Amino acid sequence: MNYKMKSKAILAATLAMTMAAPTLAFAADHGDHSSTGGEATGDMGVSSPASELRSALTHLFTEHAFLAVETLKKGADGTEDFEALAGALSGNTDDLTAAVSSVYGEEAGAQFKEIWSSHIGYFVDYANATAADDQAGKDQAVAELDEYIVEQAAFLDAATEGRLPAADLEAGLTEHVGQLVAAFDSYVAGDYEASYISEREAINHMVMVASGMASAITDQFPENFENSVAVTPAADLRANLDRIFTEHAGLAVMAMQNGVDGDPDYDASAAALLANADDLSAAVASVYGEEGGAQFKEIWNSHIGYFVDYVVATANEDEAGKEQAMAELDEYIVEQAAFLATATEDRLPAADLEAGLTAHVDQLLAAFDLYVEGDYEGAYSNLREAYAHMLMPSEAISGAIVDQFPENFKGGEMPEGMPSTGMGGMAEEQGMGAEGFLLGSLLAASLGAAAFMTRRRKSEQN
């Protein structure tokens, strides 16, 4: 198969298209964050062409895992919003196809879409067979997924001219399929904690997939990426923040839905959201110290609590309570912006941060309000916008950190302890020194969930 590389302009336009309009608005409001770190930031890859590609792929692949699991769960429950959520998953596939087409051409993009869409269909077959208690149907779906793995691996091996070996790809795709099936099976079995752990593992695994693909593409067509490198300490920082921030948006929306509906998996969804907050707080602590991490966590978790207050007030048709929650969110925005501006020594101006945080809060509230109103298409459109929007603070914060501590991000090789980025499985994340950048593994979420639920119960009692 002869794949033609499209021009860099087409690639940039296509990848930009995959980010929702509010993301672009954030960039316009906040200026060009690619220059936040000066020459050092660009040289070290936070906003290099290769890092931009990696970030775009991280966005789309992690969103796929998140939307796939949530769609399967909605399908199992037969909820009214299932079709709208499936539509969001289809939209993600369209965006991934556009990205592939921008690199390898329309014909290859169409082939990718056909193969990629097939595995989503096989997951649906598995879910339907599960609902019908049809073991033969489940076995058939699993067999078809196995065939998909081989076909998808062969396609990517050929497209990258062997830079992503089929055997390694098959191992990574097998892990992806296994994680999604595990998340769904655990959900159906009522083991919600295990389901959300598998969902978060699936999301995190796709960060590695994006890294591998970005590395292969930039090695294959170096002139189209200014000979920049996709895997550097700085690019790793941005990619991992991409994962944590976008996951926060997705988990927050689903936890709010579960809360207002009184779903049995609410506690587990809240625990997953707070485990995500733990990851983010650990990352902040690894840069700014334990005291800074603790202060960040207190502020960050407060806004999660205010969203809970808003959900509880909505469920109780308490307009005054909703207004109070929104007022508290406004106060959070100012406090969070001040913290980040101070921590980065004003590399991130408070006014710009407030604008970005306001957009984030508005998107989550809009996604929730539209869901409550029954406008499911609008709700999931806002969810995708909120997910994409979080790429902008990720780029800005990572750029500021690299500019602030350049000595920790020099060179093109990952420092000891940074996660590997192979296609074959989950990275082994090891702790780094205080000056490094730590991304915690999935933390036990039970304590966080307890705090989360305590706040909710207090709100209900009031």
Image (cartoon, rainbow, N blue to C red):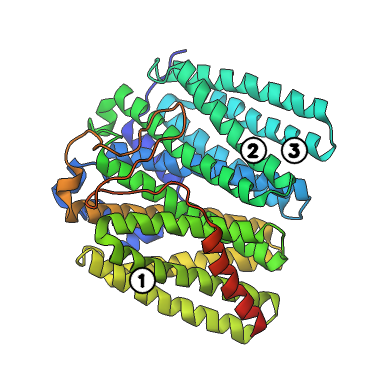
Residue 6, x across and y down, in percent: 37, 27
Position of 462 with respect to 234 (left or right) is right
Residue 453's place in the image compared with 131, above or below, is below
Between 244 and 60, the one nearer to me in the picture:
244
Between tags 1 and 2, which lies in front?
Answer: 2
Position of 192 with respect to 385 (left or right) is right
Question: Mark 2 Cα within 10 Å, few/some/many (few <14, many 20+)?
Answer: many
Residue 84, x across and y down, in percent: 68, 51
Say what amino acid the circle numbered 3 marks: Ala
Say what amino acid the circle numbered 2 marks: Ala
Among the two numbered marks 3 and 1 on one chain, the one whose residue lies closer to the N terminus: 3
| Residue at image point 70% right, 26% down | 142
Q: How many marks?
A: 3
Please tell me whether mark 3 sits on a helix, a strand or a loop.
Answer: helix
Mark 2 lies on residue: 182
| Residue at image point 52% right, 33% down | 97
